[in-house]
Amino acid sequence: MEIRTEKLWSVEAEAGVLGSMLITPECIGDILPLIDGKSFFKPCHQVIFDALVTLFVASVPIDAISLRTELKQLNQLEQIGGVEYIGQLMDSVPSAANSLYYAGVVKDRKRYRELIRVVEKIKAVPGEPLAVDEQIQQVQELALGLEPGGQEKEYYTLAQDAERIAAETKEQLSYIPTGLRNIDRVIGGFCPGELVIVAGRPSMGKSALALQFAISMAKAGLAVIYFTLEMSAKSLIQRALQQYEPAELSKLDVTIHERADTPEKQIAFIRAIKQRRQIDVVFIDYLQLMTTGRKSENRVQEISTISRKLKLASIQENVPVVALSQLNRQVENRDKHRPRLSDLRESGAIEQDADVVMLLSREDFYRKNEDPDAPQDGGAELIIAKNRRGATGLAELIFLDEKVTFFDKSSLKDIGY
């Protein structure tokens, strides 16, 4: 593969940035969000940029003399070419009018060098003494570490951006209804960029509730990806067929994937689908069955890594990521078996990373286990224990075993009960 050096670096653009910073220091504040010292190819340019930023942050007047003094204190003046080179930089541009253009060129060249570096690393992976699955995992992690774009805005001002963002928000679907009014009354629905955790002990109905959310959203015209790690795709479809006719389900845009057990596999699949069409919401069933693919990590670190990557995926792909999670056994030793945030299994990072945490509880389940003849009312609670954008609260539901479905408690009459 032949690589053109002009795509790897531009000494002229680097000099243009530094010259602009020297003759018009006011432009430094606009340049900083775009590049840093490591963006420069020439080592001496890295040193000069960092020195200028140090002066800028310290509110020291910037000119050739203050820069020379700073570089002398760092014992770097002769290494960068002395005062003569500082003069050359100042002469390299007539004004700072094009400083952001030069900074953009420097940023693009750095990103291209990073691309080449990752490609070389990927080429070396097949020669490493690892199993094929581990090699594939390494390649996915390396590739996903390269983000497209690169000119994203990093800061906003109310004066310039408030009206524009308000207009954009009105055009977008802010909330995705869950299909259960008692839940939506508390949280409004799911939002793009959020990590939502639905947690509960085994047999509480987490998978049933997630599938119910997914179908309800698909019926509203949204495109859904459902990663299932516990049940097979066939089993999920069979469960859906208990409630709907095949003709109804065939109209829904729900894609079920049953082998994506790492964040990288899931993100790669989401991006592959998004190249062809829109994706509106992602479900993962469930978090504790996921892995990072690295044997060396302990389980707490592994879950923390997974949780963080899922949160980042929700932001980068601009979709709600709804992940199911297990709760620990402390719930079963508690009066009324009511779960708490602290019951999230294996890692406090789940609570930290999540925007919304909902804890599913069915006292009926425990009552039936203790006394099979005890009366059952189907009562269920979804405790909204964390809601980063609003109030917490309680959604009262009814779970009907024969339908494997949740209903709003207030809608019993509507379903003939």
Image (cartoon, rainbow, N blue to C red):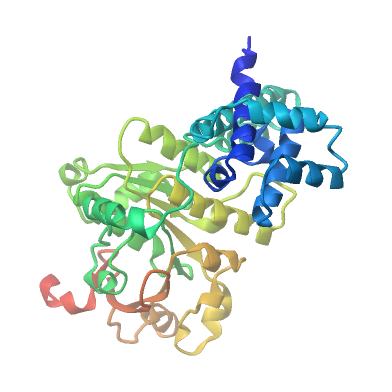
Q: Quadrant of residue 247?
A: top left
Front-lying residue, 89 or 253: 89
Task: Reply above or below: 377 against 116.
Answer: below
Front-lying residue, 159 or 297: 159
Picture residue at 48% right of the left edge, 71% below the top: 201
Task: Reply above or below: 101 against 184.
Answer: above
Which quarter shows the C terminus? Answer: bottom left
**Residue 159 drawn at (x, y percent):** 35, 58
Q: In which quarter of the image is residue 293?
A: top right
Task: Reply above or below: 272 against 222.
Answer: above
Q: Is residue 35 left or right of residue 73?
A: left
Picture residue at 85% right of the left edge, 47% below the top: 73
**Residue extending furthest bottom?**
335
**Residue 54 drawn at (x, y percent):** 71, 50
Q: Is residue 126 left or right of residue 232?
A: right
Picture residue at 45% right of the left edge, 84% below the top: 370
User: Is residue 241 at least partly visible in the picture?
Assistant: no
Which quarter shows the N terminus? Answer: top right
Q: How many labels does the image show?
A: 0
Q: Is residue 118 left or right of residue 409?
A: right
User: Is residue 299 at least partly visible in the picture?
Assistant: yes
**Residue 349 drawn at (x, y percent):** 59, 64
**Residue 215 drawn at (x, y percent):** 26, 53
Front-lying residue, 199 or 273: 273
Picture residue at 70% right of the left edge, 24% below the top: 126
